[in-house]
Amino acid sequence: MPESKRLFFAIELPAPVQRKIVRWRAEHFPSEAGRPVAAANLHLTLAFLGDVSVEKQRALAAQAGRITQPEFTLQLDDAGQWLRSRVVWLGTRQPPRGLLQLANMLRAQAARSGCHQSPQPFHPHVTLLRDAGQAVAIPPPGFQWAFPVKEFALYESVFARGRTRYTPLQRWTLGNTQRNSDEV
Ligand code: 3AM
């Protein structure tokens, strides 16, 4: 069988934000609320690709490299639970246009490359707890954690020894308007 990897595009969270999230989660959710996502795995998914061959990975990476999108600021100021997917999440009340455009482009490129895309609209979120099948009280986020997003990454998801680990394989810088201005 040809080698394939389970891949997705995502935004990495700065380590200090990951630490703040973990502290906030520990203060507000009992351990039975769900399975906490490890601090280093906290991310915001842009497009899920599924199991991808080496050739398709190369093609998707080449297409991602052609995206020219401005940087934006992401403000985590919302929280909620989706009972159907059994997750508790953090999100943003007003997703920046740059975030939505970036996700839409990556999702469209993935669909054109034959990666099945969910028909659900993109709901930017950072998953905090999985297997959260019982409704839990979601405290109003008493924070507005904002950070600049200057790049996005292609991640591999590996499940080994009972643990899932997300590893960034490749990164692309946002705000690369050089190419645009070259074309003018
Ligand atoms: O950002 P989150 O953690 O919600 O749920 C999985 C995770 O998203 C999602 O891809 C991210 C990295 O694993 N995911 C897993 N399987 C999926 C699927 N079949 C999926 N998203 C859509 N369809």
Image (cartoon, rainbow, N blue to C red):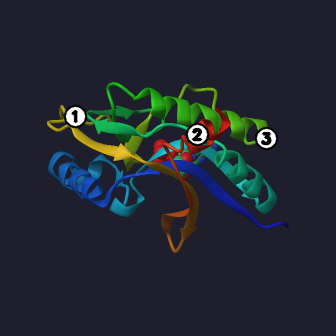
Asked if the residue at label 1 sits under 8 Å from ligand 1, the reply is no
Asked if the residue at label 2 sits under 8 Å from ligand 1, the reply is no
Q: Earlier in the sequence, mark 2 or mark 3?
A: 2
Q: Is residue 133 visible?
A: no
Look at mark 2 in the image and give the residue it sits on: 68
Look at mark 1 in the image and give the residue it sits on: 137
Q: How many marks?
A: 3
Q: Earlier in the sequence, mark 1 or mark 2?
A: 2
Picture layout, residue 20 above or below residue 48: below
Image coords of residue 100 (percent x, y) = 50, 30
Q: Earlier in the sequence, mark 3 or mark 1?
A: 3
Q: Secondary structure at mark 3?
A: loop
Image coords of residue 151 (percent x, y) = 47, 50
Q: Quadrant of residue 158?
A: bottom right
Q: Quadrant of residue 184?
A: top right
Please tell me how crowded label 1 is: few (under 14), some (14-19), or many (20+) other residues with Cα within 10 Å.
Answer: few
Would residue 137 be found to the left or right of residue 151 on screen?
A: left
Image coords of residue 11 (percent x, y) = 46, 48
Look at mark 3 in the image and give the residue it sits on: 114
Image coords of residue 73 (percent x, y) = 34, 38
Q: Secondary structure at mark 2?
A: loop
Picture layout, residue 126 above or below residue 77: below
